[in-house]
Image (spheres, rainbow, N blue to C red):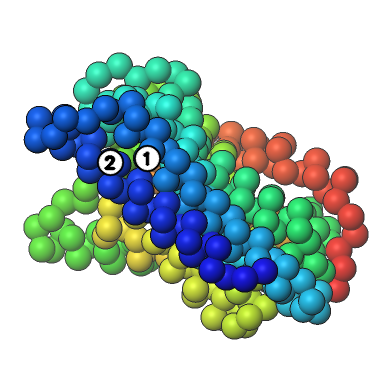
């Protein structure tokens, strides 16, 4: 497959969509006479052309790399997968633009459906892209089964390593918070705190402490780290995945917390590598999110502990059944 069709589709799509959107804005301000409906259709066509270009690149890379041995990663670039996931997430939230604007401004009514989609759209994008372009294409052949060789011992073994990983990331977070306090800048209110103040608290809690840990661990540790590990080794793969994990949260966390998130992401990679199972990293991720959410909302200790226990039970109830259906792991 030649490379040029992908570039033509992607570049042309971006240019067409950008010009159409600019024309719509100029029309709204009265500088030009424009048909917003027609321009909206043109902008949509440009966006679809851009997505088609990205998909073309992904399919091309899969076809080129399918001749590689099974122990190598044979799928699209991790950055291309992230771009596609972001596009899918944006497409899912597009019908709920008014809800997103209301959430961002803190004013207006937000529908329950819009709330749910906005909260999980990014993670759904990660799952869809990972399934279509990595799992379905067998791009990570010889990948250990989802729960690992033996999930229960992996969870037990992961307790010690998970505590160390959590302590390490907490130390970094404490240092950042202490630095902010010394320079007179209080920790900012994050989007999660804003969301829980405006949306259904139960919906926000489930999205943050149950759905996000499962989706993000499947993509970042299961797909991203495993692919990078086969290319640049365990340490390099963990660091690179940590950087990507921190950067991808730029839209949902304040910039000062991106470094602690990156460290946490890298340590989760090492936890997965050490235990051979995604379950310990999913549980630790859920516990970390539960604790962070509870502290940010000034919950009492019994409430925080109850959410942590509930989150752990929920993620285990959702992922442990896969241990009975997963095939025996192959040697990686």
The residue shown at (44%, 18%) is 112
Image quadrant where one finds the N terminus = bottom right
Which label number is shown at residue 43?
1
Q: How far apart are marks 1 and 2 (CA)?
A: 6 Å
Residue 218 x, y percent position in the rendering: 64, 53
The residue shown at (23%, 43%) is 22
Residue 283 x, y percent position in the rendering: 61, 49
157, above or below 66, in the image: above
Q: What element carries label 1?
A: helix
The residue shown at (40%, 33%) is 41
Other-residue count near label 2 (Cα within 10 Å), few / some / many at <14 / 14–19 / ≥20: some
From the image, tell me which residue sits under label 2. Answer: 21
Residue 61 x, y percent position in the rendering: 65, 69
Which label number is shown at residue 198?
none
Other-residue count near label 1 (Cα within 10 Å), few / some / many at <14 / 14–19 / ≥20: many
The residue shown at (65%, 41%) is 315
**136 vs 215, nearest the viewer:** 136
Residue 105 x, y percent position in the rendering: 21, 31
Instruction: Say whether disc 1 or disc 2 marks the residue closer to the N-terminus.
Output: 2
67 relative position to 36: left or right: right
Q: Do the residues bearing badges 1 and 2 touch, measured as CB atoms within 8 Å? A: yes
């Amino acid at each position: 497959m030649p490379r040029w069709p992908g570039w033509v589709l992607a570049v042309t799509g971006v240019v067409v969509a950008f010009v159409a959107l600019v024309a719509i804005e100029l029309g709204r301000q009265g500088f030009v006479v424009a048909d917003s409906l027609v321009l909206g259709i043109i902008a949509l066509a440009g966006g679809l052309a851009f997505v088609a270009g990205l998909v073309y690149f992904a399919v091309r890379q899969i076809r080129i790399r399918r001749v590689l041995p099974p122990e190598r990663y044979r799928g699209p670039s991790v950055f291309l997968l992230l771009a596609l996931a972001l596009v899918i997430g944006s497409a899912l939230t597009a019908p709920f633009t008014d809800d997103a604007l209301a959430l961002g401004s803190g004013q207006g009514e937000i529908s329950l459906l819009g709330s749910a989609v906005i909260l999980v759209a990014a993670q759904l994008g990660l799952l869809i892209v990972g399934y279509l372009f990595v799992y379905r294409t067998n791009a990570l052949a010889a990948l250990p089964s989802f729960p690992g060789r033996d999930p229960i011992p992996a969870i037990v073994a992961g307790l010690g390593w998970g505590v160390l990983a959590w302590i390490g990331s907490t130390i970094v977070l404490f240092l950042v918070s202490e630095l902010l306090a010394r320079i007179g800048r209080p920790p900012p209110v994050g989007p999660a705190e804003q969301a829980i103040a405006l949306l259904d608290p139960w919906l926000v809690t489930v999205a943050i402490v149950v759905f996000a840990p499962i989706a993000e661990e499947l993509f970042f540790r299961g797909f991203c780290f495993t692919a990078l590990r086969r290319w640049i080794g365990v340490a390099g793969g963990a660091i690179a995945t940590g950087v990507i994990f921190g950067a991808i949260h730029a839209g949902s966390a304040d910039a000062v917390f991106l470094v602690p998130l990156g460290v946490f992401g890298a340590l989760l990679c090492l936890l997965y590598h050490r235990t051979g199972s995604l379950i310990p990293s999913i549980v630790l991720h859920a516990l970390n999110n539960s604790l962070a959410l509870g502290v940010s909302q000034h919950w009492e200790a019994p409430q925080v502990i109850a959410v942590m226990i509930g989150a752990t039970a929920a993620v285990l109830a959702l992922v442990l059944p896969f241990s009975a259906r997963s095939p025996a792991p192959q040697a990686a």
